[in-house]
Structure formats: C-alpha cells, structure tokens
C-alpha cells in the first residue's frame, strides 16, 4: 500500500508543478547553503591545516611580543636558535613598505619612463619558500642559502606585485630598484592561498639584505622547523630559555608549538562554521514552514477528494500517511537538489578562492536525512488536519 | 454474507439530532428501516426531508444519535472510526450525484482505489477492475482521464468503482441528478441489471418517477419514514397531509367518486 501511496503522491505533486517547485525551493536554498558552507569550511580548514603541517615536521613560532625591551632578533641570535639540537632550520620574516622603482634602460625593457610604486618588501630565507610556496613558483627560482649568506641583491615577486608592475610580461633577469638599490628579479610566485597570502603583495628579498642594506630592523618573529617531533617539548623549552636569555626577561616573547596554533585555528573555524550553519538552518526552517503552508492549502483544496477517499474506505491513518508522504517527498526532493546545488557552489568557490575541494558522503546523507525530517515535522499538522476531516462535510464541500 | 431474502440491513428507532448552539435540530424521528438481500429500494423525499442524513447513516459516514443499526450482522452503532472505514470499504458501494472521480487519475486507477484501501495486491486489483469496467461497457477507456468521458460514462466508472469490492449494498445518491433524461435511463437500466444479478441497491432520490424504477419505495418526509401504502393514505401527490388541505381532500374524493 505504501508503494501506491507514494505513486499517488507523485501524481498529486506533478499536477501542481510550479507550486511544488516553489515549495521545494525553500528546502533547496536551506540545504544548499548548509552544504556549501560546510564544504567550503571543510575545504578551507583542511587547506590551512595542510599548510600548517606543510613540511611534515613540526614548526615552532617564536616571536618578540614586547618590542620595548628588545627590538628583535639579530642575525647572530637567529644562528643560536639554529644551533639547538633538533632545530632543522629557521624561517625569519621582516616586512616594511618601500618605494619600488623601475628605471628605463638596459635592465628595464618594458618601460621607457621612470615608474615608482610603493610595495611591501619582505625579507625571508629559503625556508619561507618550502613552508608556504613549495613548488609554487610561476617562473624562475626561489631565494636560496647562498642568496642569504652573501646578502645577494635578488628578489622574487609576489603574483599581485608582478601583475601590477609588469602585466603578463616575464621580467626574470631584469632589475628593479628598491629604495635606492638595484635588485635582480629571479622568480615569480604563483598566487598563494591559505595562511600566508602576504607574499602575493610583496617583493621578497633575502632577510640578510633586508636587515642590513634595506635597514628594515631586526627579526621580531620566525618559524623554526623541528626535525624530531618526539622531542618537541624539550626543544620548545630550550627555545624559551634562549629567548629569556636574549630578551633578558621571562616575559615579552612567545614560543608557540604549531600544533597549538593548529588547534586554535580548527576550533575557531569550527565555531564560525557552526554559526554559519546555524544561520543556514534558519533558511531550512523557513523552507519547512513553506511546506506546511503548501500542504495546508492542499488539504483545503482537496477536501472533497479526502471525503471521497474516506467514503471508499481509507482509514484516517492512511489519509494522514498520504499527506505526510507528500510533504516528505517535497523535502527529500529539495534536499537532493539542495545538496547538488550546494556542492556545485562549493566547487565553484574552490576554483575561485583556490582551496582544495572535498566533500564527505556523510554530509550529503545527513543533509538529505535532515530535510526528510523537516518534511515529516512540518507535514504532521496538515496531515492530521486531513485525517480528521469529517467525510460528510468533506464530500459536501464542492 | 446473507442469502437472498434474508435481512441485510436493519434499523430500529433511529434518531438523529444535531446539537446547535441554542437549539437542537431533530432530523430523523424513530426511523425503522429494513432491507433484504437482493432488494432494490428507493428512498424518496424532497430536499430537507432528512434523506441525505439517512443515507449518511446507512453508508456509515455518520452515526445515529440513538437507535440500533445492524448491517450484515454487524452492530454499526458500536463501531469506531477505523472500523467504520472498513465497513465502508467492504460493505458499501457509493454512487454519488457528481460522480466524484479523481480527475488526476486514469479510469482504471479510479476504479482500483477501494481495493488499494482493502490491501488487495496490484495484479488482482487490475483484474477485478477490468471485469467491472467491461461490464459497464468501458473496457476500452481504462487509460482515459475522467474529464475525457461523457457524464454517463463517468457515472459508469463510478458504478464500477462502487462494485469493485463486491459490497453488500450499492448506495446511490441521486445517481442521475447530473445527467440528461436518456443517459439517466441507461444508468437506471444498469442498476436493474445489477439488481437482477443479485446486488442489493438502495437509491436516494427526490424524483418520484425515478424512484419507480426500484422494486420498493419508502418515503421520507420531515424526518419520518413511511411505506408506500402509509404514505398514500396520509399524503397527497404533493406531499401534503390530507387533513391539512380540506379542499385538496375534497378534490381527491370527487376524483375518486368520478372514477
């Protein structure tokens, strides 16, 4: 009998195609926004986590939090960190805004006039590239150990900077003037996504040059790569001790295991996702009310039909079941279409933003199940109303 | 099931009172009514006489305020909603004035509907519906929508639907009310044929000419039931009591004496 009821429900819904679709739309929008938000959120989170745990080893971020007692780490300070057991490398980072000039002549074939712009200049070493831009060079090469050791006047352009200055022209080998010093362009970055997007807007130079020639001050923060994650705690406390020595105080610096940062990031993104999903759930609620509304209209339109069905021997429970099935069909239909739409939105967003697109089957099943539940809950009231109609009154209503 | 001539339907002292906010409406007064297996009975009465209420009670769509109603050995007055559904499904075949076919469904889907509620399997449903559609002469229209058929054809579909569960009683409410004269006669012929084959039929109508197609007529007036004989003794042709209309009484007496 349930098979017959389902068949009849489809028949009913088909006769009012536009109304059925509009009612379904409420659920479609609700489910699509939930799915899109969750999928985008999961994608971004996993991209961030992937970057955070980028090298496979563990990272520790060391920073000066109070620059009044000490202005930053000098190059020799950094070398002390590097000499600690288990520290494989350190990735310092300095930044400052500097005038960047293109001077016409042999070294600048694109422009025949002086062009000056202001750009963020970032001082890093080779670890920056392996941490944040691994294999992410559009052209040329990254800054290497020798560039750092010899304070070479070379630079890598972030994608936005490159586009601003050169459009689509390949400037590898040409010269750019930062402040009053010439730098040879050795590479161009691809667009970076995730945690470290500042590189996109920066001219990247060896940090040794930034500290000395470009006078960008001392390093206030750097990442250390720890080779052995087992001894992470020991290494962190060694670093803390070293910081205390350098700063001359037990305060004013922070040594943070990247795992802790990752946990914080995950909990924050979870919180934001939860809130967004909550807002999307309101859309689903509105969709459910739409179903209830449509079913109530349907019950009063089909009063005669209900009366007839009762006269032909349909029990109240059967009438109730029929209207419930209709509501659930609408909501499941909306759920399936909503999932498809949501995943499409998330996929398009992944192409635009550039995170990794993934979706989980459990999310899909959960969404469809959830929408079925919405149909069931909001279908009960109209279905009860239909099942309780007095057949005489119902048959008389014409 | 009862055999031909045995009592199939028995009503004793049926009252129906609708309680309104201030007054109450006494629609049926102590109605005693009996129908035997294989009968074709007309219930004749003008509008407002209570015949629709009586039909609803016979059809188990409504229950009496007092009195007993035994149908096919079951005491209907004691049944609950769910059980009444079952009685309507198995024992009553409704035929309505406005046919009451579901417009979205094909002819055959309309006919099998009661069998769905009786939980008959799909194959058997179709076979039983086909037998009846052939019987009413619509075997070639099974896939049509009701709206594609004439009024007479639609009523034939409705009769096939009413017969499909092989009910004890075919209960027809003004079955020709929405049809023209000739088509109406065809429907009446169909009823007679079904009755000849043994089906018990109760027809409710306000049309005395139509009522004469039945083998027996009972009258209902102001909520009271009269046999044909009682009615003729008490009322004139227009349903007016003899005592209340002396001039009419006079005329009738004169007419009788003239004969």
Image (spheres, rainbow, N blue to C red):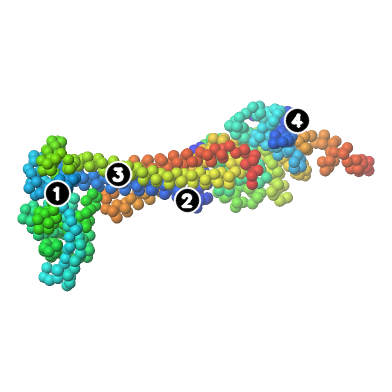
Residues at marks 3 and 4 touching, judged by CB atoms closer than 8 Å: no
Answer few, some or many: residues within 10 Å of disc 1's Cα (few below 14, many 20 plus, some between 14 and 19). some
**Residues at marks 1 and 4, common chain?**
no
Residue at 61% of width from left, 47% of height from top?
Answer: B138
Answer few, some or many: residues within 10 Å of disc 2's Cα (few below 14, many 20 plus, some between 14 and 19). some
In which chain is the residue bearing label 3?
A: A
Q: Where, by quadrant of the figure, is residue A253 drawn? A: top left
Depth-wise, is mark 2 or mark 1 nearer the camera?
1
Depth-wise, is mark 4 or mark 2 nearer the camera?
2
Q: Earlier in the sequence, mark 2 or mark 1?
A: 2
- Front residue of this view, candidates A112 and A242: A242
**CA separation, marks 1 and 4?**
109 Å
- Front residue of this view, candidates A198 and B258: A198
**CA separation, marks 3 and 4?**
77 Å
Residue located beneath label 4 in the image: B30
Answer few, some or many: residues within 10 Å of disc 3's Cα (few below 14, many 20 plus, some between 14 and 19). some
**Residues at marks 3 and 4, common chain?**
no
Seen in the image, is B98 located left or right of residue A75? Answer: right
Callout 3: helix, strand or loop?
helix
In which chain is the residue bearing label 2?
A: A
Q: Where, by quadrant of the figure, is residue A261 drawn? A: top left
**CA separation, marks 4 and 2?**
54 Å
Depth-wise, is mark 1 or mark 4 nearer the camera?
1
Residues at marks 3 and 2 touching, judged by CB atoms closer than 8 Å: no
Residue located beneath label 2 in the image: A21
Residue located beneath label 1 in the image: A71
């Amino acid at each position: 009998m349930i098979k017959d009821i389902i068949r009849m429900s489809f028949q009913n819904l088909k006769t009012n195609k536009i109304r059925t679709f509009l009612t379904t739309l409420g659920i479609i929008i609700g489910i699509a926004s939930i799915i899109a938000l969750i999928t985008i959120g999961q994608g971004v989170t996993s991209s961030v986590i992937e970057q955070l745990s980028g090298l496979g080893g563990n990272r520790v971020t060391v920073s000066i939090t109070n620059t009044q007692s000490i202005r930053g780490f000098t190059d020799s300070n950094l070398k002390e960190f590097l000499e600690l057991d288990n520290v494989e490398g350190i990735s310092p980072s300095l930044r400052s805004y500097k005038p960047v000039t293109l001077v016409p002549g042999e070294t600048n074939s694109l422009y025949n006039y002086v062009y000056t712009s202001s750009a963020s200049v970032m001082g890093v070493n080779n670890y920056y590239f392996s941490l944040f831009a691994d294999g992410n060079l559009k052209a040329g090469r990254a800054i290497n150990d020798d560039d750092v050791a010899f304070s070479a006047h070379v630079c890598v352009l972030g994608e936005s900077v490159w586009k601003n200055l050169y459009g689509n022209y390949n400037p590898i080998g040409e010269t750019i003037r930062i402040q009053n010093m010439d730098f040879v362009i050795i590479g161009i970055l691809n667009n970076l996504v995730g945690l470290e997007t500042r590189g996109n807007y920066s001219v990247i130079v060896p940090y040794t040059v930034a500290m000395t020639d470009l006078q960008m001050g001392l390093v206030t923060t750097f990442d250390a790569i720890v080779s052995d994650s087992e001894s992470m705690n020991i290494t962190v406390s060694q670093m803390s001790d070293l910081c205390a020595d350098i700063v001359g105080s037990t305060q004013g610096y922070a040594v943070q295991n990247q795992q802790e940062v990752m946990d914080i990031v995950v909990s924050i993104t979870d919180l934001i996702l939860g809130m967004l999903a909550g807002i999307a759930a309101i859309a689903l609620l509105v969709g459910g009310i739409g179903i209830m509304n449509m079913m109530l209209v349907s019950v009063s339109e089909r009063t005669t039909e209900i009366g007839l069905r009762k006269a032909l021997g349909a029990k109240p429970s059967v009438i109730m079941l029929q209207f419930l099935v209709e509501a659930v069909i609408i909501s499941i239909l909306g759920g399936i279409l909503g999932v498809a739409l949501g995943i499409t939105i998330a996929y398009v967003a992944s192409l635009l933003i550039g995170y990794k697109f993934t979706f989980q089957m459990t999310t899909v099943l959960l969404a469809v199940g959830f929408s079925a539940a919405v149909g069931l809950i909001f279908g009960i009231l109209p279905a009860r109303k239909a099942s309780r109609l007095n057949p005489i009154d119902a048959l008389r209503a014409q | 099931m009862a055999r031909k001539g045995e009592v199939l339907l028995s009503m004793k002292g049926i009252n129906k009172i609708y309680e309104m906010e201030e007054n109450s409406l006494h629609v049926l007064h102590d109605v005693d009514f009996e129908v035997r297996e294989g009968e074709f009975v007309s219930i004749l009465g003008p509008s407002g006489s209570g015949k629709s209420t009586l039909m609803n009670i016979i059809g188990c769509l409504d229950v009496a305020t007092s009195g007993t109603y035994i149908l096919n050995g079951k005491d209907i007055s004691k049944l609950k909603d769910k059980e009444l559904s079952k009685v309507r499904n198995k024992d009553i075949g409704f035929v309505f004035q406005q046919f009451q076919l579901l417009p979205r469904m094909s002819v055959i889907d309309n006919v099998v509907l009661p069998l769905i509620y009786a939980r008959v399997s799909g194959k058997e449903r179709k076979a039983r519906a086909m037998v009846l559609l052939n019987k009413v002469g619509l075997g070639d229209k099974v896939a049509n929508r009701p709206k594609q058929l004439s009024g007479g054809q639609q009523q034939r579909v409705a009769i096939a639907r009413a017969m499909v569960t092989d009910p004890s009683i075919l209960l027809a409410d003004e079955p020709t009310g929405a049809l023209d004269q000739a088509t109406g006669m065809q429907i009446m012929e169909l009823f007679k044929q079904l009755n000849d084959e043994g089906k018990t039929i109760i027809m409710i109508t306000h049309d005395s000419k139509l009522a004469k197609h039945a083998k027996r007529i009972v009258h209902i007036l102001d909520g009271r039931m009269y046999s044909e004989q009682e009615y003729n003794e008490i009322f004139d042709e227009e349903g007016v009591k003899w005592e209340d209309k002396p001039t009419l009484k006079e005329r009738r007496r004169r007419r009788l004496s003239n004969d």
